[in-house]
Amino acid sequence: MRHTIPSASQFYVTAPQPCPYLEGQMERKLFTSVQGDSAKDINNTLSKQGFRRSQNILYRPACADCSACLSARIDIKKFQPSRSQRRIVGRNSTLHRQSSSPWATEAQYDLFKTYLDTRHADGGMVDMDVFEFAAMIEETPVNSQVIEYSTEAGALEAVCLTDIFDDGVSLVYSFFNTEFSKKSLGIYIILDHIKIAQQSGLPYVYLGYWVPGSKKMAYKAKFKGVEIFHNKNWTPLDQNEGYAANASSTDFTSLSAQVAEISMPNMTPIRER
């Protein structure tokens, strides 16, 4: 199904399929392509409205009877590392960070495959071949970087594909060596991106979706300063809010109405707190 808004962008909705985060739920996504001269502006604008990028597609959940997936970001002005997070930084203090333009390598792919085999063996990406992996990394129409973390001996330990927004950095996809779980490399990547944002004078780190009730996503709520895109606004995450996954169909805005409410570049921006 196709929907349009005044900017002439076209939005589509995927067919329902089993949700990867909540058992018994069905997933559906609203998406549009991002390409051409306006790609950067569209990516910046839609990211502020809960959209995420995958190659040249921007998407956000539009499930028929569930609203659990909430876009999350860290307001770095409000971030203070916990004792545990400070220890994680210390454990990884010898890692060397290197940023480059999006370019896939064999070392990245080997690390990626090992990561999937140990952490997401039943996921939809586990059968991704080297060419599909290269497309995931390299096919970006916006300002993106590949950030690698290596040991002093040069061994690749972690990789993150990162988008650079006008107001922050976005972790599009990350993977890492799972052999030493005590190093908590996944958490370290986020902590280092907070540092990257601070050094760049950018106020936010975009984390993707947080799903209350999903053990896979619980770590995102442990960062002080997290806020979520809820009821069309960014608001501080309140663990006591009890964000409901289920609601009656009357509680959900129609797809046409959702599209009509989307702000695009050169249109009225969405309200901030």
Image (spheres, rainbow, N blue to C red):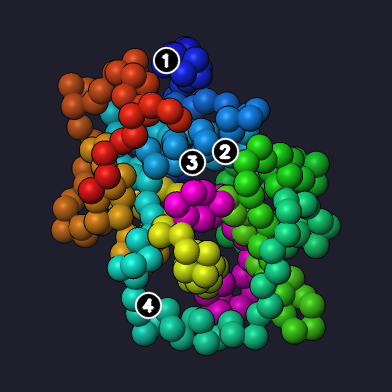
Q: Position of residue 60 (x, y in %)?
A: 43, 35
Q: Residues within 10 Å of mark 1 (few under 14, many from 20)?
A: few
Q: Picture quarter containing residue 131?
A: top right
Disc 3 is placed on an element classified as: helix
Q: Earlier in the sequence, mark 3 or mark 4?
A: 3
Disc 1 is placed on an element classified as: loop
> Rounded to the nearest whole Å, what is the CA distance between mark 1 and mark 3?
18 Å
Q: 270 or 115, which lies in front?
A: 270
> Rounded to the nearest whole Å, what is the CA distance between mark 3 and mark 4?
27 Å
Note whether residue 157 is visible. no
Q: Position of residue 176 (x, y in %)?
A: 63, 66
Q: Residues within 10 Å of mark 3 (few under 14, many from 20)?
A: many
Residues at marks 3 and 2 touching, judged by CB atoms closer than 8 Å: yes
Q: Position of residue 179 (x, y in %)?
A: 64, 74
Q: 180 or 61, which lies in front?
A: 61
Q: Amino acid at mark 2?
A: Lys
Q: Which residues are magenta?
A: 164-185
Q: Residues within 10 Å of mark 2 (few under 14, many from 20)?
A: some
Whether residue 173 is in magenta: the answer is yes
> Rounded to the nearest whole Å, what is the CA distance between mark 1 and mark 2?
18 Å
Q: Residues within 10 Å of mark 4 (few under 14, many from 20)?
A: some
Q: Earlier in the sequence, mark 2 or mark 4?
A: 2
Pointer 4: what residue?
A: 81
Pointer 2: what residue?
A: 40
Look at 26% across and 39% down and name the residue there: 271
Q: Nearer the viewer, mark 2 or mark 4?
A: 2
